[in-house]
Image (spheres, rainbow, N blue to C red):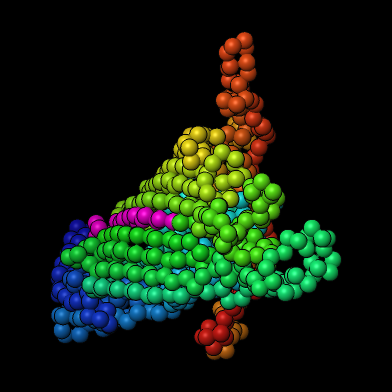
Amino acid sequence: MYKTYLFSRLGLFLLALFLTSLNVLAQRTITGTITDNNGDGLPGASVTLKGTTNGTITDFDGKYRLEVPEEGGILVYSFIGFLTQEKEITGANVMNLVMGEDTEVLEEVVVIGYGAVKKDDLTGSVGVVDTEDFNQGQNASPEQLITGKLPGIQVTPGGGIPGGASTIRIRGGASLSANNDPLIIIDGLPMEKAVAGSGNILNTINPNDIESFTVLKDASATAIYGSRASNGVIIITTKDGGKKLKVNLTTNFGVAQIPQLIEPLNATEFRTLVEEIGTNNQIALLGDTLTNTNWQEAIFQTAYGNDNSLSVSGRVGKVLPFRVSGGYTNLNGILKTSNMERMTGSLRLSPTLLNDNLKVNVNAKVSQVNNRFADPGAIATAIQMDPTQPIYNSDSDAYGGYFEWLDNNGRPVVLAPRNPLAMLELKEDLSTVNRFIGNVQLDYKLPFFPRLSANLNIGTDRQEGNGTVFVDTTAALSFYNGTGGTDNEYSETRTNDLLDFYLKYDQPIGENNSLDFTAGYSYQDFFVENQFINRDVKNIETDTTDFKGDYVLVSFFGRLNYNIADKYLLTATLRQDGTSRFSKENRWGLFPAAAFAWNIARENFLKESNTLTTLKLRVGYGVTGQQDVGGFYDYLARYTSSRPDAYYQFGDEFVPTLRPEGYDANLKWEETTTYNFGLDYGFVRDRISGSLD
C-alpha cells in the first residue's frame, strides 16, 4: 500500500510538472520599435515584463524582441532622460512606443568631480551655467560667457586686451601670497598654468564649443580635488554629437569702446594750477598755450573684431555620434596696437559599444593664437602726462618724431614719463601659441556586476609658446637699457599628462534609499622647458635664462553618497595627494570633507505644495589644499652658475662662481578649512528659485 501511495504521489508531481511546462511553453514573441518625439530610434532603452526579471534592451535602431507568456501582462518601458511608461499586452504582437522626454530629470543632472549627480541630490554649493544662459555677443575668451551669471564667482576682464587673462575669484582668495586662481577642468582634464606668450589658460579654447560651466564653491564639493581646490573648481564641458546631422555656422562682428574715461585736469586747468603753485622752472616746462592733448583719447581706439565658427554634428552610421568644429577669431583691443588672432579646431566622438556597457568619449582640440601685446603701462602714463604737451615733436624726428622730455644734452629724462602713444607704436611685442588638448575616457559597466562600473581617463595638454619683443634704437623706450634698442626672444613648452582611474558602485536599498561609492587613483605629470634671451638690437646679449623641470602629483580619492528616503543626503569625501614639489617628510597631504542635506520639500507636510516646490537645507565641512607655494624644487638646496659679468678672476683667468639659491626644506601644503551653510529654495515649480549660502 505504501508503494501504491508513493507512485500515486509521484504521478501527481509529474503531472503537475508537465502541466507547468506546458504553461511555460505557452509563450509568444512581442516585437516593436521605441522612438523619441522626432521619430529617431532610442538605442539601449529597457523593456521589462512588470513584476518579473524578464526583459531586454533595444538595439541601435530602437527595436526590441521579447518572449512573454501567452496570457499577457504589462510591459514597462524606461530610458534615461525619458518618462517611464507602461503598456498592457493585448492581442497584437507588435507594440511600438513613442517616449516623451522627462525635462525635469534632464535639467537636474549636474556634472561634479569624477561623475554626475541629480541636482536634488547635491549636498555642496554648486552652480551651473549652460548655453541657454551664456552671455551673448562677441566673447573673446570662455570665462566671459559666465561673467555676472553666478553668485560667489567674480570675473574681472584683463584690461581691454583681446583674449587677455581675466581674474577669476570664487568666494575671494584663499591665500595671502600663493596662487588664488580656481582649478579649471576641461572635459575631465585639469589645466595647469598658461605657457609664455599666452597669459590666459582659457583663450586657446573656442567659446562656441562649450556646453556648460559647473562651479564647485565650497570644500564639501571641491575636496575630491584635494590639494588644488582651495580656490574652488570650474568644470567645463564641451558640446558633443547628436542623432541627426546638424550644421551650424555662426558669424558675428563686434565693436568695443571705452565707456568712460578718467577725467584729469585739462590743459587750461593744469596750466592754471602750475602757474599758481609751481616754481619758475616748472612753469617754464609748460607747453604751448594752444595745445590741449587728451592722452587717454590718444592711446585708446574703437576696436573692431569678428568671430566665426562652423560645426557639424550628427552620427556616423548607427553607433558613432560625433561633432567637429572650426573657428577663426580676429579681435583688436581698445588699447591701440593690441590684437589677437585665433584659429581653433575640435573633434568629439562618443560611441557606445558592447551592448551599451562601454561608453567612449574622445576629445581633441587644437589651436593657434597670434598675439600683439600693447604695453598696459601706457594707460597709467596717459593719466600722468602733461596735457599742454603735443603728441608729436614738429621740430625733430628724434625718438621716432614723438614728444619726449629731454635734458640739456637732448637725451630722454630717465625719471620723466614716456610718451604713452610712443610706448605703444614703437614697441612690437609678438607671440604665437600652439596648443593641443586631447583625452580618451572609457566608462565600462561590468556585465557580470552591472552595479559596478570602471572609468579610465587618459589625456594630455601640450602648449608651445614663443615670442619676440622689439624696440628700435630710435625709441626713447630703448634709452632705459643704454645699449641701443631691444630685441628679446623667448620660447617655452609645457606638457601636462594625466591618468585617472576610478570605480563607481551604486546600490538601491529598499524603495527610497540608495548608496553609491567612488574610489580611484590619479597620476599627473607636469613638464616645463623654457629659454628667455634679453639682448639689444646689435645682438649683444645682456641676460639669458634657461629652465627645465617637472613635477608629479599622485592621488588616491574616494567619495560616499548615501540617500535616505529621498529626503536625507549624506556625502563623505577623502583625498590623499602626494607631490614631488615637497620633501619626503611633507610630501603627502590628507583632505577630508563631509556634507549633509535635508530635502524639506519632500516631507509629507510640503510634498503636495504647489507653491513651495524646493526647500533644501545644506551643511558642509571640508579641508582643501594649495601646492603652488613655490617653485618645482624650492625645498632643495641649489646653486646657480654666475653670469659672465660676475666671474671671479684668478690671475689672467676668469672662472664662474656658484651662487646659493634660497630654499625651505619645510615647505608643505597650504591648507584651508571651510564651513558652509546653505538653503536652496524654489517657488511655483521653481519658476522662482535661488540659494542662500
Q: Nearer the viewer, residue 317 or 650?
A: 650
Report if residue 366 lies within the magenta region: yes
Q: Is residue 344 above or below residue 150?
A: above
- Against 338, residue 636 (above or below) is above
Which image quadrant: the N terminus?
bottom left
Number of numbered discs present?
A: 0
The picture quadrant where one finds residue 638 is top right
Residue lying at 60% horizontally and 21% vertically, measured from the top left:
647
Q: Main secondary structure of the magenta part?
A: strand
Between residue 585 and residue 462, name the one nearer to us. Answer: 462
Does the segment drawn in magenta span residue 483? Answer: no
Q: Residue at position x 22%, y 80% from top?
A: 39
x 53%, y 55%: residue = 397
The residue shown at (61%, 84%) is 605
Q: Which residues are magenta?
A: 352-371
The image shows residue 493 at horizontal and vertical percentages of 43, 42
- Relative to 229, is 248 on the left or the right? left
The quarter of the rendered structure image containing the C terminus is bottom right
Q: Splitting the image into 4 quarters, where does residue 668 fall?
A: top right
